[in-house]
Amino acid sequence: MYVCILHRDGETLVHQNMKAGPAPFLRAIAPYREDLVVCVACLFTWSWLADLCAREGMPFVLGHALYMQAIHGGKAKNDTIDAQKIALLLRGEMLPQASVYPAERRATRGLLRRRMSLLRKRAELLAHIQHTHSQYTLPEIGKKLAYKAHRDGVAERFPDPAVQKSLAVDLARISSDDRLRNDVELTMVNTAQHHDAHTFYRLQSVPGIGTLLRLVLLYEIHPIARFPRVQDAVSSCRLVTCAKASAGKRSGTSGTQIGNAYVKWAFSEAAVLFLRDNPAGQTSLARLEQKPGQGKAFTVLAQQLARAVYDRLTRDTVFDRATFLHG
């Protein structure tokens, strides 16, 4: 990794490539540890450095990679240039900061995100079965293969032994992944009850937010105090777009990649599930559809749910359906 150390006067003290690791890093900064502030871009390898600084009692700043790219974007870009640019932005107090996720919850959040890969593979296997079924123009199965009880005899519907074997492999992998996924989900629920049982159960009061969505919101939003305003929280959820304007003239929107994609997915799912068996919620959606249209109405509903969750978490109260629909 490249390390660049700047004096407060702007003099470059160290600018070199070194082996990534705690011991080499501590040796490199040993002569300059007094009043040293460590900063790194929020790439996937930043966590060990944040934990090291916490143990050593050194200030640590995590830079927002996308925002920094917009600030110091140039023709040439490599690790050597990036290290110096980060140091210059930090010295000039222009560094856009990202949130440093608590170390004690980082592994559980990683496990929660890892579960997504199991779901994607499961969807891919189910889609392969359906595509093969359509390829041979057989009568419709008529049942959802997502349920284990509906998978019996699916492979035997095909006359070719090779096709039967191919689908048998798909079905076996689905059953195996289901067992792994259920075990992962149980582990995460038990861990969430240990980390913050109060918040975990308080999120249950919001209609449309089940166990998995509660896990996503608990581990992706935490800590809620990092958002000073509800607007900041909704923006972080990718539920609003930012206008590009100059001299009073708008030129589209930007910032669609800024924010947490997992939280956006969670609130988008919650907006759909909120309407299930909820006539009052369906009436509210119909009222929203009158102005922006159906597509944007769901986005507005997701924004309202995000605002409600932020309000509940900051005020430490449960969800009030009447206030949400009519207040």
Image: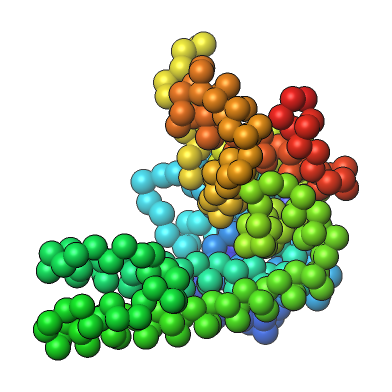
Q: On the rendered structure, is 186 left or right of 198?
A: left
Q: Position of residue 3 (x, y in %)?
A: 58, 67
Q: Nearer the viewer, residue 124 or 287?
A: 287
Q: Residue at x 50, y 67 (%)?
A: 116
Q: Examine the rendering and report whether any part of residue 10 can be seen.
A: no
Q: Position of residue 179 (x, y in %)?
A: 52, 83
Q: Residue at x 66, y 32 (%)?
A: 280
Residue 12 occupies quadrant: bottom right
Q: Nearer the viewer, residue 313 or 180?
A: 180
Residue found farthest to the top: 248
Residue 262 occupies quadrant: bottom right
Specify the quadrant that holds the C terminus: top right
Q: How is the image coloured?
A: rainbow
Q: On the rendered structure, is 163 left or right of 150?
A: left
Q: Position of residue 60 (x, y in %)?
A: 74, 61
Residue found farthest to the right: 316
Q: Residue at x 67, y 78 (%)?
A: 187
Q: Examine the rendering and report whether any part of residue 251 can be seen.
A: yes
Q: Position of residue 22 (x, y in %)?
A: 67, 81
Does 196 sit above or below residue 23?
above
Does 130 sit above or below residue 222?
below
Q: Residue at x 22, y 87 (%)?
A: 165
Q: Nearer the viewer, residue 56 or 33?
A: 56
Q: How many marks?
A: 0
Does 87 sit above or below residue 279?
below
